[in-house]
Image: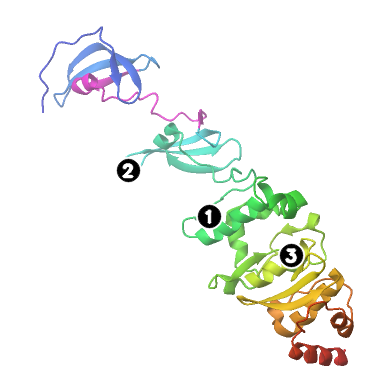
C-alpha cells in the first residue's frame, strides 16, 4: 500500500476530529510499510507525534499525550466528582481499549474501566449518596430488581424528600428515619429476604412494606426503617396501621353532630352506626372488628374500653348493629 506524495502546507492549521488543532511540522517520508509519514504538533498540549499524512489531512488523529493515562492524574466526572488514576493496565486484547484502575476521591470507591470512559466524564460512583442526599446503589443490580428498588426508593422518598406530600406529617418531618445500612440499596436487597412475610410479598402484590407493627410502643419521632423493625403486611392491615399510628382513629369519621362508624371488609364497607362521642364510636368499631376481621387484618383503636351494652344504648342511628355481631360480642365478654 502506498500514498502518492503531496505538497505539504506547513502553515496550515488542521482540526482533529477528537483533540483540537494541530500543525504538520516535518515531512518524514515513507516508512517501512510505504506510508507517507509526517510529524505533527498539537497546539493545545504542545505534544509532538508521528502520523500518516492522509489521516493528518482529514483530521483523523488523536493526541497521544491526552489519550495516554497518567498515574496520579486527577480527572473530573459529570456528576460524581473527581477521580484519580491508580494504575495503567494497558490495552484490552478483545476491545483494544486502554484499561485503568481508578479511585473516586469523595468516596474512595475503586474500580477498573476503559480510559476513554474516564475522558468522557461518564463514569458513575455507585457509592456516592445521590438519591435524596442519602441513598446510593452500591454493587446491586437495579435492572433485575426493579420492584425492590421501587420499595427502597419510596422509603427514602418519604423520609428524606421534603417535597413528598407525606414527609411533613408522617415521615421525615415527623422524625422517621432509615438506618444507615439501608441507605445502600445493595444492603437493603440483602436484608429484604429475611423480613417477616417476604415470601408472601414477593408473589403477592396485596402486601405492603410496614415499619409500624413491630414498633407499636415507639414514638413516631424515634421510628426507623431497619432489618429488625420492618415486615410485610396486607395492604388492608397497613392502611389501618397508618391511621392508628398517625394519631387518628380507624373506621371513625366526624359528621355534623356525631361520629359515623364503618368497617372495611375486603372491597366492601359495612355501616356500623353513628354515635355522639368519639370514644363510643371507636369502641363500636373495635367490637365489630373483633367479629368480622381475621387476626392478620385486626388492628383496634387504642382507647379505653366501654361495655358493649353502654355503647349500643347511646347509638344515635336507627340501624342496629348486626344481631350476629351483638351475640358474638356478648359471648366474648362472658368468657373474659
**Residue 234 showing in the rendered view:** no
What secondary structure is found at the residue carrying circle 3? helix
Marks 2/3: CA distance?
Answer: 58 Å
Q: Nearer the viewer, residue 305 or 37?
A: 305
Q: How would you rate the neighbour count of disc 1 (Cα within 10 Å): few for under 14, some for 14-19, many for 20 or more?
A: some
Q: Residue furthest front?
A: 318
Q: Quadrant of residue 193?
A: bottom right
Q: Is residue 55 above or below residue 108?
A: above
Stretch of the chain drawn in magenta: 48-76
What secondary structure is found at the residue carrying circle 2? loop
160 displayed left or right of 49: right
Q: Quadrant of residue 247?
A: bottom right
Q: Which mark is residue 140?
A: 1
The verdict on residue 64 being magenta is yes
Q: Which mark is residue 95?
A: 2
Numbered disc in front, either 2 or 1: 1
What residue is drawn where x is 42% and y is 33%?
A: 120
Marks 2 and 3, the one that precedes in the sequence: 2
Q: Quadrant of the N terminus?
A: top left
Residue 94 is situated, as x and y percent measured from the top left of the image, at 31, 45
What secondary structure is found at the residue carrying circle 1? loop
Residue tagged 3: 243
Marks 2 and 1, the one that precedes in the sequence: 2
Marks 3/1: CA distance?
Answer: 34 Å
The verdict on residue 186 being magenta is no
Amino acid at each position: 500500500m502506498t500514498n502518492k506524495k503531496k505538497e505539504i502546507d506547513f502553515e496550515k492549521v488542521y482540526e482533529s476530529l477528537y483533540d483540537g488543532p494541530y500543525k504538520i511540522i516535518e515531512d518524514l517520508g515513507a516508512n517501512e510499510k510505504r506510508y507517507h509519514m509526517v510529524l505533527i504538533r498539537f497546539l493545545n498540549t504542545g505534544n509532538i507525534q508521528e502520523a500518516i499524512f492522509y489521516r493528518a489531512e482529514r483530521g483523523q488523529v488523536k493526541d497521544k499525550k491526552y489519550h495516554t493515562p497518567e498515574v496520579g492524574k486527577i480527572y473530573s466526572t459529570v456528576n460524581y466528582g473527581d477521580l484519580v488514576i491508580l494504575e495503567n493496565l494497558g490495552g484490552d486484547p478483545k476491545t483494544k481499549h486502554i484499561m485503568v484502575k481508578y479511585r473516586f476521591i469523595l468516596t474512595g470507591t475503586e474500580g477498573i474501566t476503559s480510559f476513554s470512559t474516564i475522558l468522557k466524564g461518564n463514569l458513575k460512583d455507585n457509592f456516592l449518596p445521590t438519591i435524596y442526599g442519602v441513598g446510593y446503589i452500591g454493587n446491586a443490580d437495579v435492572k433485575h430488581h426493579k420492584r425492590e428498588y421501587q420499595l427502597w426508593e419510596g422509603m427514602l422518598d418519604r423520609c428524606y424528600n421534603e417535597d413528598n406530600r407525606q414527609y411533613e406529617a408522617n415521615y421525615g418531618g415527623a422524625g422517621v428515619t432509615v438506618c444507615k445500612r439501608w441507605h445502600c440499596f445493595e444492603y437493603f436487597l440483602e436484608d429484604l429476604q429475611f423480613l417477616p412475610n417476604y415470601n408472601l410479598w414477593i408473589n403477592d402484590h396485596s402486601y405492603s412494606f410496614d415499619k409500624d407493627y413491630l414498633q407499636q410502643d415507639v414514638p413516631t419521632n424515634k421510628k426507623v426503617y431497619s432489618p429488625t423493625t420492618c415486615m410485610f403486611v396486607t395492604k388492608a392491615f397497613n392502611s389501618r396501621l397508618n391511621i392508628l399510628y398517625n394519631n387518628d382513629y380507624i373506621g371513625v369519621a366526624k359528621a355534623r353532630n356525631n361520629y359515623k362508624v364503618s368497617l372495611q371488609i375486603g372491597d366492601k364497607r359495612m355501616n356500623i352506626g353513628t354515635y355522639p362521642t368519639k370514644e363510643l364510636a371507636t369502641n363500636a368499631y373495635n367490637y365489630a372488628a373483633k367479629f368480622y376481621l381475621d387476626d392478620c387484618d385486626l388492628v383496634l383503636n387504642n382507647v379505653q374500653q366501654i361495655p358493649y351494652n353502654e355503647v349500643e344504648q347511646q347509638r344515635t342511628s336507627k340501624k342496629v348493629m348486626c344481631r350476629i355481631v351483638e351475640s358474638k360480642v356478648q359471648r366474648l365478654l362472658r368468657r373474659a
